[in-house]
Amino acid sequence: MNKIGWMVAVLALGAAAAFGQTPVTHWDLQSVTSTGTSAWVETFPFTIQGVILNDPEEMLDPAYNPDATGASNGGQFQMFIQAVTPGDRGGTAVYMAQMSFLAGNNYDEAGWNSEMQRVMFDGNGRKFRKGDLVEVTARKALFYNGKRNINEAHRIDPANNFDITLVRPNTVLPQAEVLTLADLKNADDSAIFDATRADGGEHYQGMRVRIDGLRLVDTNGWGQTAWANRICTAADDTGRTFTLRMPRTDLGAPPATSEYVSAVGIMNQEGGVTNGYELFVQEIRPALSLGPTAVAGGAAVSFPADYDGYVLESTDDVVGGVWTAVDATPVRMIVIEDNDEAEIRFYRLRKAD
């Protein structure tokens, strides 16, 4: 190769490196120091893959608000994606807001609606939803309250955009990991912080979990709308307490404060770098569904696989009757709820590529 050809090749390689995107794991992105600050060495742009854990509307209202005075009452978008790649662990929040605390960086209505179309739908107009496997291309990721968030660094410059690409639709949500408050809190009710992420909130951050043995101390945040107001406190039977951040979705009536339940949701961190862990709640106690069986007169009782380890019991008298275990062999099934309004639809099962 002559000198000119060699120089062209070097320049081409340099351009590829400059415009390339480095794959990053959740484990590396969310790494922290012994004092809880970020240990990740910034490399932009980067790509990261994960399964969507929540529909954005569950957490925040993405609708444009013409009367907004700040990020807290303007349109906001946030979803968590959880690692599914072998060897990776953890999850990451993807966030943006209509309003910014930086002057000149608020979206107008057309701009915000365009951004929501861009990040909430794929190139074919299909809306992303929880259970989708996606790849996010990030150009900014600020560290805030103990975790790295993929965002636009509070600026409307298109150079700060993140992009979401559908890898595979409708994958199964990651199984919720089962824990108790003893896995998150010390006996004195202080947060367990472990920078190696072998224990405590760091071990579960950004992931679907199920916390057992909880009762509500208060229901002040149940059914509230504003993010700051959607707070309930839960406790176990040892005196450990934990913050529950309630969703915008309707969970029905709250359980009695004397009733011990399980809560399924996303482990988040909002209040500090070595503490402030909380559960974004998506479900309280198992939700049972009842349907017919192939045998006439039978009943098929189903509940999410996140409640593995629970025992189904029955009684003929819910007031004063005796509850006994149902003597039946459990059958694991995948249930897909199709809410399409078509009067006639045909189905088949095909192995995915």
Image (cartoon, rainbow, N blue to C red):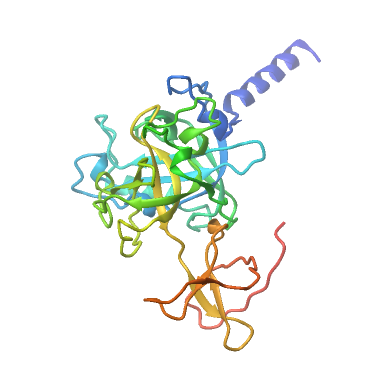
Q: How many marks?
A: 0
- Quarter of the image for residue 189 reads top left
**Residue shown at 35% from the left, 61% from the top:** 251
- Classify residue 292 by image quadrant: bottom right
The residue positioned 54% from the left and 38% from the top of the image is: 90
Q: Is residue 207 visible?
A: yes
In the rendered view, tell whether residue 322 sits above or below residue 273: below
* Residue closest to the far bottom: 296
Q: Position of residue 258 (x, y in %)?
A: 32, 57
**Image position of 154 with respect to 14: above or below:** below
The C terminus: image quadrant: bottom right
Left or right position of 70 against 22? left
Left-right relation of 152 to 222: right
Front residue of 4/181: it is: 181
Q: Nearer the viewer, residue 271 or 341?
A: 271
Residue 84 locus on image (x, y percent): 61, 44
One can see residue 338 in this view:
no
- The answer to which image quadrant residue 326 occupies is bottom right
Quadrant housing the N terminus: top right
**Residue farthest along the top direction in this orientation:** 3
Q: Does residue 240 appear to the left or right of 332 in the view shown?
A: left
Identify the residue at horizontal 58%, vertical 79% (top origin). 345
Please determine whether, in this image, residue 93 is positioned above or below residue 302.
above
Residue 263: percent from left, percent from top: 43, 53
The percent coordinates of residue 112 (x first, y second) are 33, 46
Relative to 100, is 201 on the left or the right? right
Residue drawn 52% across the image and 32% down it: 199
